[in-house]
Structures are given as C-alpha cells and as structure tokens.
Image (cartoon, rainbow, N blue to C red):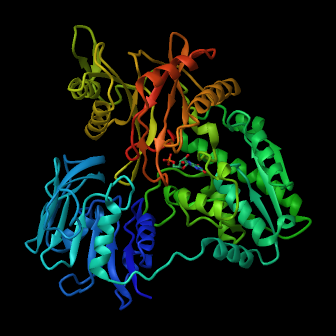
C-alpha cells in the first residue's frame, strides 16, 4: 500500500503527524531513523520534531541520499533543521527560542502556503534554528525572531517548517500538510477503518476466553475501555476494580457508582485505600516521586485483588491508557520523559512485558476516544466529561517541606527599583518585560512542571497583575506571558491575579484537610464554569503559598482537542474577579490565580 513514512526523531507530536496524514486520506507509518529504508511504496517522507540539537554529537541522523532521492521530504522542527543540514545548511543554537503561538509572514510563491493569507499564526517550540540555507532552497516564511521559519527547495522536492503544522493551534496546519500530500500523490484512498469493530476483535483475540479485569479510574478513557471489553467478551466476563485513593474530586467515587448502576453494570469492586495512600505520601514533595508512589501502590493493590480473583479463573488486566499517556512517559526510544503517567510505572511495564495487559485504546487521542465512546452507544454526557488524571488531586496539591524560599536560586540578589526593594536578577528582568504592558510580577518560590522544545522543565511560576488604573486585557496578558517565559530561564509558567499579591511560602503536605479544602474550591469552580463548552479541562491547584494566613489556589481552564497542546480559555475579567471572591468564602481560602500559560511551555497539570 502507498504510504507516507514519518521518521520519529523523538518529538512529542510524531504520532499526531501520522494521524493527521491518515485523516487526510493517505496511509502513514512511523519509522525509527536508524531502521528506515526507502521502498517503492513510500511516496513521501516526513521528518518529525525531536528534543535534540542537530549540532550535538550524538544527535539522531538518517541515512538518505538527498542528492538522488525523488521522494518528497517534509521536515518539521528538528526535522526542518536536520533536512536543511543534510542539504548543506547551517543550524545555530541561540537567542531565538520560541515557544507557543507565533506569527509568520509567508511568501506567495510557496507551495505549502499557496492560497493562504500572507500572515499565519503557527505553533513554535524550538531552541535551535536554521541560520544559513543551502543554495538549492529558498525561504518561504519568516518570523520576528527567525529568518527561516520555512523553506522549499527550488525543485519542489524538499520542504521545511520550523513550526508544528500537525497541532491544532497552527491555524492552517492541516491545509499545509494537505499541500505536502498533494506534492506526493493525487490519490487519497485510505479510509480510517472502523475503529470500533477492529478494536472489539482485537480484544477478543488477546483475551482468548480469559476473563478481563479492568482498572477503572472513573474517567472517560477507562469507561470507554470497559464498554469495549463488555461488547467484546460480555458483561459476565468483565470485572472492574476502582481504587479509591482519596484523591478524587468531591463526590466523584459515588458518582462513578451511580453511572455504572445506570449502565446496568454491577461487577465493580471499590477498594477504600485513602489512608494507605496518605500514609505512603506523607512528607513526599517532588512530583515524580509522588507519581511513582501512587502508581506502585495502585499496582500493588490491584495485584492483591487479581490474586484473589485469579483463584477462580485466568485473567487479563485491562487499562484505559491513551496515546498521550505513553508518549509523555517517554515510552518511545527517543521521546523525552515529560512525566510518568500512572499506567506506565515499572510494575505495569513488567506486566505488559509478561503479556498480561490489554490496552485497547492506547493508539487513540482523547477526541478519538470520545468519538469511539459515542459510537459504542455511551451517553454523550459521560464521554464528554473533562479528563481527570489517574493520580488525581495528589498532583494538584503543590507540596513544600520548607517555608524558606529557594529564590534567588543561584543568582545574586541586588537592589532594584525603589530603595530597599531587593529582587533577584530574573525578577528584575521579568518586571522590565512586564512594564511595557502595564503589568507587575513576582517569581513564586515554588516549582511546576512544563514542556519546552520536547523536554520536561521544572521551574518557577511567576504571578503577574495589572498596575492600578490599567484596564485588564487578554492581548497584553498573553504577549507578556509568552515573552517572559521565552526570555527567563527560571520561569516556565505565568499566573494572573486580578489584584496585587504578596504570597509567602509555607510547609504543605498531602493531608486530608488540605485535600478537602481543594475539593471545595474545585467543586465551586466546576459548578460555576460547567456550562462553558470551550473549556476542555480545568485543573484547580492548591499552592503552598499564603497571604494573611489564607491559602492561594490556581484555576487552569484550557482549550484543547487532544491534550498534546493547549491554549488558555480567556475568561471575562469581571467573571474571574467574581469567582475569586466566591471561593474566598471557603474557610482558609485566599487568592485565586488564573494560569495564563499555553502548552507548551506549561503542561496542563502542574505536576
Ligand atoms: P499534561 O499535564 O501532561 O496532561 O499536559 C495532559 C493530559 O493528561 C492528563 N494527565 C494524566 N492522565 N494519568 C492520567 O491518566 C496521569 O498520570 C496524567 N498526568 C496528566 C492531564 O489531566 C491532561 O488531560
């Protein structure tokens, strides 16, 4: 079958490129650079992005004779750079790092941008850039920061784009990929197979008459996986275990039981494990450490249950893992680990290797899981619930084992601004950037996870607010946030406050009263924003930061379609102020902050 080969240089979006190409009607397959051989069936090649620098000695290369190959090649991000380098260009690391939405100006004679407006909004995530293009190519787009945002070879065989056309935030990315496909072929004969039937058949084949035990978190993914299992092997052969970790949202475990009762499914065992989880996580602060403990406990508990059940029959374990869970856990050889999702801890990986686990939807993205859920006949309201992470609220409480701020990290403090006010260098730089927009900011003495240029980051959020008399507006807020993160090495996330704040670090651990308070804040904010269809997910995060003895919280409403990238939902400022005042009615709750960071550079969750 004719296909387009996607070469995986380890980027976070490689799988997404493959999926987009298939959606555009051409079969596509992912290959490792070292194993790739050009065959007759391959009508086009796409080099993916990747976390490395082309100039690094151990950077991934690909052995293709570019002088003689006739097959068109499109390079994306790292792929754009390595292709330029293979053609004789020069790549530089440097000042021009760009993350997030960027405007580019396109040349009208380009193939990829033909028919599009000259100004395009695209999604960038890179450190290096193409500094010198080979003579055989011409620049087809540039941005404020880089000259070569895109190039095409004069013989129309090679194409490079520094940005990511495969993510939804590149407005016309699909059109650009479509144009590349048109260079490769005029046939669009690949139709997405009927997911549902082939997945049901796959489960039957893997289960081979064994009973299935599903680890049910209660989220959309495990629900869809469960429905697939039921349709594959029948209700009586499917058992579910729901571990109540104590990290669920308000009334959630109870709602799950009601859902399943409504669906007429009764083989569910709920294991109350809150005390155990709190004991094991007492005093644990570091996010990866938390995730690993949660994942391991989950498997231990599930294993004990399996042993009991196994006395009766041979079993297979089923997980509702979806594609982003595996890719962000660094599961392909070359992708950088962003965070270990709970269904990829070592214990689960061992069971997978032993052939004991079925993951029927592991190739799918969230939007595909939802479509599949509807096709399976699940109620719309169930499959369109917001995603909720396996480790639950445990990764939404930012813990601290100290009340001594760790800023200024390795930088000397120095006097800045009015006499006596001491800031570290980064905070001074932050305020220089913000001043242009009438904003003021402080770097917070805590850390959160982010993703920049395919790598995990673990840096500081900064809180910013408008100067008195300045009307809040999203335009300034977004540009200021993106500039600050691109410029400052120690900042990977920006949160907005509707008023000035002075937050102090205090010790905070995963304890029941802390979780209960978060549950209350989360429940109110969810209730108040429930009707906003554009919000795809809205983590609410508890911080170890206090003002006048009252704790600060963050709301993070994001718009996304597959969680690989996300933009910020732009709430009306008066509404945000109303919500802030509303949650302050809860005992001990102080400032409410609004996360204004896109993904990348921030991840959706804070840990
Ligand atoms: P991030 O924070 O990586 O999240 O941008 C992307 C999506 O994945 C969810 N998420 C998880 N889901 N187990 C899960 O089942 C996990 O460990 C986990 N971590 C993040 C997150 O809520 C978002 O929808």
Residue 215 picture quarter: bottom right
Query: In the image, is 579 to the left or to the right of 239?
Result: left
Seen as rendered, the residue at the extreme bottom is 40
Residue 247: % across, % down: 68, 37
Residue 244: % across, % down: 76, 42
| Residue 8 makes an appearance in the image | yes
Seen as rendered, the residue at the extreme top is 419
Residue 557: % across, % down: 49, 37
Residue at (21%, 57%) from the top-left corner? 117
Residue at (72%, 34%) from the top-left corner? 279
Query: In the image, is 352 to the left or to the right of 232?
Result: left
Q: Decide: is 189 above or below 541.
A: below
Quarter of the image where the N terminus is located:
bottom left
Residue 95: % across, % down: 19, 46
Q: Decide: is 97 above or below 134.
A: above
Q: Decide: is 418 above or below 57.
A: above
Residue at (29%, 25%) from the top-left corner? 427
């Amino acid at each position: 079958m004719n296909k387009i080969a996607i070469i995986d240089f380890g980027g976070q979006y490689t799988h997404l490129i493959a999926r987009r190409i298939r959606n555009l009607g051409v079969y596509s397959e992912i290959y490792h650079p070292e194993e790739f051989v050009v065959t007759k069936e391959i009508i086009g090649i796409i080099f993916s992005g990747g976390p490395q620098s082309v100039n690094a000695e151990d950077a991934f290369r690909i052995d293709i004779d570019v002088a003689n190959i006739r097959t068109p090649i499109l390079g994306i991000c790292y792929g754009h750079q390595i292709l330029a380098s293979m053609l004789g260009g020069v790549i530089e690391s440097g000042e021009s790092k760009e993350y997030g939405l960027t405007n580019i100006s396109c040349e009208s004679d380009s193939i990829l941008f033909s028919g599009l407006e000259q100004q395009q909004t695209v999604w960038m995530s890179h450190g290096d850039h193409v500094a010198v293009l080979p003579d055989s190519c011409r620049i087809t787009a540039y941005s404020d920061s880089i000259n070569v945002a895109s190039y095409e070879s004069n013989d129309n065989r090679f194409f490079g784009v520094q940005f990511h056309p495969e993510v939804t935030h590149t407005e016309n990315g699909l059109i650009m990929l479509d144009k590349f496909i048109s260079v490769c072929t005029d046939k669009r004969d690949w139709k997405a197979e009927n997911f549902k039937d082939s997945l049901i058949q796959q489960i039957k084949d893997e289960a081979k008459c064994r009973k299935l035990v599903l680890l049910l978190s209660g989220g959309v993914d495990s629900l869809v996986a469960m429905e697939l299992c039921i349709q594959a092997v029948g209700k009586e052969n499917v058992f579910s275990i729901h571990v109540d970790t104590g990290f669920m949202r308000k009334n959630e475990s109870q709602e799950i039981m009601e859902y399943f009762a409504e669906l007429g499914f009764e083989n569910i065992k709920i294991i109350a494990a809150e005390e155990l989880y709190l004991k094991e996580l007492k005093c644990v602060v570091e996010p990866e450490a938390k995730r690993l403990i949660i994942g391991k406990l989950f498997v231990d508990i599930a294993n004990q249950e399996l042993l009991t059940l196994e006395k009766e029959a041979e079993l297979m374990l089923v997980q509702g893992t979806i594609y982003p869970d595996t890719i962000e856990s660094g599961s392909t050889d070359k992708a950088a680990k962003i965070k270990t999702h709970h269904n990829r801890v070592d214990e689960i990986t061992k069971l997978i290797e032993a052939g004991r686990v079925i993951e029927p939807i592991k190739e799918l993205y969230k939007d595909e899981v939802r479509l599949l859920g509807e096709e399976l006949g699940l109620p719309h309201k169930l499959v369109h619930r917001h995603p909720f992470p396996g480790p639950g609220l445990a990764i939404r409480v930012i813990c601290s084992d100290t009340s001594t701020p760790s800023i200024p990290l390795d930088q000397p403090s120095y006097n800045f601004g009015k006499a006596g006010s001491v800031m570290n260098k980064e905070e001074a730089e932050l305020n220089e950037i913000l001043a242009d927009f009438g904003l003021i900011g402080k770097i917070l003495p805590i850390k959160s996870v982010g993703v920049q240029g395919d790598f995990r980051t673990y840096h500081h959020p900064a809180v910013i607010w408008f100067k008195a008399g300045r009307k809040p507006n999203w335009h300034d807020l977004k540009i200021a946030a993106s500039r600050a993160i691109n410029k400052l090495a120690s900042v990977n996330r920006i949160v907005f406050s509707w008023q000035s704040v002075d937050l102090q670090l205090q010790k905070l651990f995963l304890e029941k009263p802390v979780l209960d308070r978060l549950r209350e804040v989360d429940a109110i904010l969810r209730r108040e924003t429930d009707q906003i269809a554009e919000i795809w997910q809205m983590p609410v995060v508890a911080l170890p930061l206090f003002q006048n003895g009252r704790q600060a919280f963050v709301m993070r409403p994001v718009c996304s379609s597959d969680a690989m990238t996300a933009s910020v939902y732009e709430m009306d400022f008066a509404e945000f102020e109303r919500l802030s005042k509303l949650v302050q009615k809860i005992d001990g709750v102080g400032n409410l902050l609004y996360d204004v960071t896109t993904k990348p550079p921030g991840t959706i969750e804070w840990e």
